[in-house]
Amino acid sequence: MTAMDITIHASFLPHNDPDASLAFYRDTLGFEVRNDVGYGGMRWITVGPADQPGTSIVLHPPGADPGITDDERRTIAEMMAKGTYAVILLATTDLDGTFARLQASDAEVVQEPTEQPYGVRDCAVRDPAGNLIRIQESALSRLAMAAMTCTDGTVKEPAHDVGDGYALDGEGDPAQPYGDTMSKSTTKDTQSPATHVADSHDLIRVHGARENNLKDVSVENRSAG
């Protein structure tokens, strides 16, 4: 069966103060404003990252749907006040820089950057409406740092950019059936064996090199002699 050509176009988050939400997503997160529509005293604001024109967040008045009852509107308002109504997960290659910017903006901090036991590093804040925003360090940046860190703690520069869970230099072994990805480094080193840093003869094995399990990096020396 041929897969359908479907992409994620937009996700909806509620707001209870359109100007405050607009300022947060535009000025603090740096999203571009793609639409701002008013109707009946309410506003629907569409925002999104400039480099992802096909994916948006629509900030909407949560009680506008005519099918929602008054009791449901009260429940929604109560959950928004508690910060338990809506959540979205974002990603960045610079988690610490992003968190510093959020903290400087007086956003409500829920969690500082933290290494989670399930293999991701993230932080969490609330937007002006109480929506929980978790921001995760992207797999690209985590895998790049893992691949640059050798067993002796030395950090070296990779020859090329690292893709999500794939070879560092485009010439590494393919992904293994048990989920590992192996790749050869192409950075030369002139240190003695006693202070050896991974070179072009070493095999960098990134165990579980996937977004949710970037934990174990080791260097196996395959140098001649």
Image (cartoon, rainbow, N blue to C red):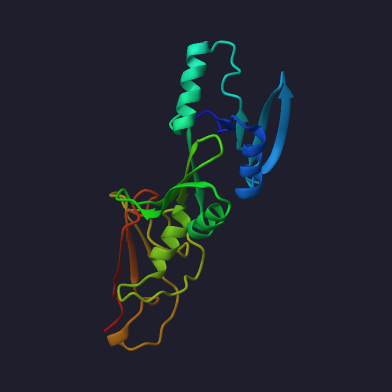
Q: Is residue 200 left or right of residue 20?
A: left
**Residue drawn at the location 41% of the way across and 83% of the way down:** 189
**Residue drawn at the location 53% of the way across and 28% of the way down:** 4
Residue 28 visible in this rendered orientation of the protein: yes
**Residue drawn at the location 57% of the way across and 23% of the way down:** 62
Q: Nearer the viewer, residue 58 or 2?
A: 58
Q: Is residue 81 left or right of residue 214?
A: right
The quadrant of the image that shows the C terminus is: bottom left
Q: Position of residue 149 (x, y in %)?
A: 38, 70
**Residue drawn at the location 59% of the way across and 29% of the way down:** 16
Q: Count the marks: how many?
A: 0
Residue 163 visible in this rendered orientation of the protein: no
Q: Nearer the viewer, residue 137 or 213?
A: 137
Q: Position of residue 169 (x, y in %)?
A: 47, 65
Q: Nearer the viewer, residue 108 or 119?
A: 108
Q: Relative to residue 139, is residue 134 depicted above or below?
A: above
Q: Relative to residue 121, is residue 72 depicted above or below?
A: above
Quarter holding residue 205: bottom left
Q: Position of residue 204 (x, y in %)?
A: 35, 67
Q: Position of residue 175 (x, y in %)?
A: 36, 53
Q: Is residue 73 left or right of residue 201?
A: right
